[in-house]
Amino acid sequence: MASVKGPGAPKSYDGSALRIGIIHARWNTKIIDALLQGAKSKLKEAGVKEENVVVQSVPGSYELPYAVKQLYSASQIQSSSTGVVGAAADLLGSATDLTALPTSKTSNSPFDAIIAIGVLIKGETMHFEYIADAVSHGLMRLQLDNNVPVIFGLLTLLSDEQGLMRAGIGGQDGKQGHNHGEDWGSAAVELGVKRRGWV
Ligand code: DLZ
């Protein structure tokens, strides 16, 4: 029987004209890496060109809203000398894989969608609640204020096990789980296409 949960039957959208940004936190790296691969695989499947996917990282989930804002702002800056890749690198600091991208192959249009990926695992203090709340509100505000889809790739987990399952890596009971990063990649393509026009 088909699952009740999830985004329903997949619809295919042509992502070949899209430019997508991904900002991911580095806390809980094993889970993050799998989610990132999942998202990238769906972007590729939809035809998003590799040179039009910009990936950046920040230490933890709390930094996601600021980084999304900076990345999006940078993509709006038209810089004839360095191009948007250089401009984004300037804004985000020098340790960046943005500069590794060949500017000539990279579109300098603003991002059509940005995926924010983070993994919060509840500990013994209230840290989790404060970060989850702040990041959720921050990302929502960003997408509404800037009219750019921000895909909510923040897992708020009660255990490591839940994260492994939701990254498709598998839990202790032998079940593999579903990689939610794939859903975020597909959502970015769909929203990116729809942002360009609903009719
Ligand atoms: C401090 C912290 C803790 C305790 N847990 C997590 C977590 O589970 N996931 C995550 O992405 N980040 C965590 N952080 C780091 C904060 O998000 C942030 O990077 C720091 O508080 C510095 O602003």
Image: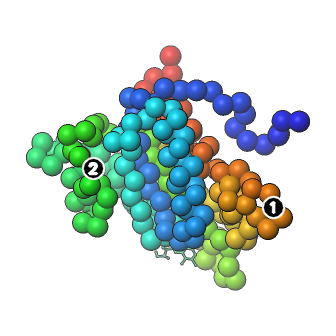
Is residue 22 toward the left or the right of residue 181 in the image?
left
Instruction: Say how many tags the image has.
Output: 2
Front residue of 126 and 109: 109
What is the distance, in whole Å, between disc 1 and disc 2 at their CAs? 39 Å
Q: Which residue is rendered at x = 38% and y = 41% of the image? A: 50
Is residue 145 toward the left or the right of residue 33 in the image?
left
State the image coordinates of residue 90 (x, y, percent, origin top left): 22, 59
Extreme residue toward the left, this view? 81
Q: Which residue is rendered at x = 39% and y = 36% of the image? A: 49
Picture layout, residue 58 above or below residue 199: below
Report helix, strand or loop for mark 2.
Answer: loop
Is there CB contact under 8 Å for labels 1 and 2? Answer: no
Picture layout, residue 107 above or below residue 167: above
Return the mark for residue 101: 2
Report helix, strand or loop for mark 1.
Answer: loop
State the image coordinates of residue 181 (x, y, percent, origin top left): 59, 50
Front residue of 14 and 126: 14
Is residue 60 toward the left or the right of residue 88 in the image?
right
Figure colour scheme: rainbow
Residue 146 visible (yes or no): no
Quadrant of the image containing the N terminus: top right
Return the mark for residue 32: none
Residue type highlighted by circle 2 = Leu
Extreme residue toward the right, this view? 1
Return the mark for residue 174: 1
Front residue of 195 and 18: 18
Respond yes or no on whether mark 1 lies under 8 Å from ligand 1. Answer: no
State the image coordinates of residue 150 (x, y, percent, origin top left): 49, 46
Q: Which residue is rendered at x = 50% and y = 16% of the image? A: 199
Residue type highlighted by circle 1 = Gly
Q: Residues within 10 Å of mark 1 (few under 14, many from 20)?
A: few
Q: Quadrant of residue 69?
A: bottom left
